[in-house]
Image (tube, rainbow, N blue to C red):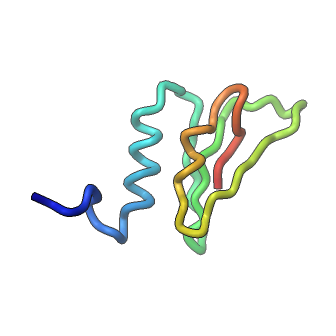
Amino acid sequence: MADLILNNKESFVMDSIQGTLYTSTLENLTFLDFENDIKVVARNDWNKDKVALICGGGSGHEPAHAGFVGKGMLTAAV
């Protein structure tokens, strides 16, 4: 029996983000991958006339807030 529930530690963050996007019922989410390992899950359809609410997890907690991206919640999670 395996002691871990992850494929490997190098791809854990990407695997988790991809799993979150894959299982989301929202079709308006996008994934942005920037240099220096900055990864963002964001809404495609947010109203530019309203304030965007962006949450940063980081410090080993990503993708903790990616599941909160959606209408009435976060615009993006970093």
Please state the horizontal and vertical placement of residue 59, each as a whole percent of the image: 59, 69
Residue at point 60%, 71% (across, down): 35
Please state the horizontal and vertical placement of residue 65, each as a whole percent of the image: 59, 47
Q: Quadrant of residue 71?
A: top right
Q: Is residue 73 above or below residue 2?
A: above
Determine whether, in the image, residue 1 is placed left or right of residue 38: left
Q: Is residue 15 above or below residue 23?
A: below
Q: Quadrant of the C terminus?
A: bottom right
Q: Is residue 43 above or below residue 9?
A: above
Residue at point 20%, 63% (across, down): 3
Count of numbered tags: 0
Residue at point 53%, 27% (across, down): 27
Determine whether, in the image, residue 24 is placed left or right of residue 74: left
Residue situated in front as seen by the camera: 11 or 73: 73
Q: Which residue is situated farthest in the bottom direction here?
A: 36
Q: Quadrant of residue 6?
A: bottom left
Q: Which residue is situated farthest in the left direction here?
A: 1
Q: Quadrant of the N terminus?
A: bottom left
Determine whether, in the image, residue 59 is placed left or right of residue 3: right
Please state the horizontal and vertical placement of residue 42, each as a whole percent of the image: 64, 43
Please state the horizontal and vertical placement of residue 31, each as a whole percent of the image: 55, 48
Q: Quadrant of residue 61?
A: bottom right
Residue situated in front as seen by the camera: 30 or 13: 13
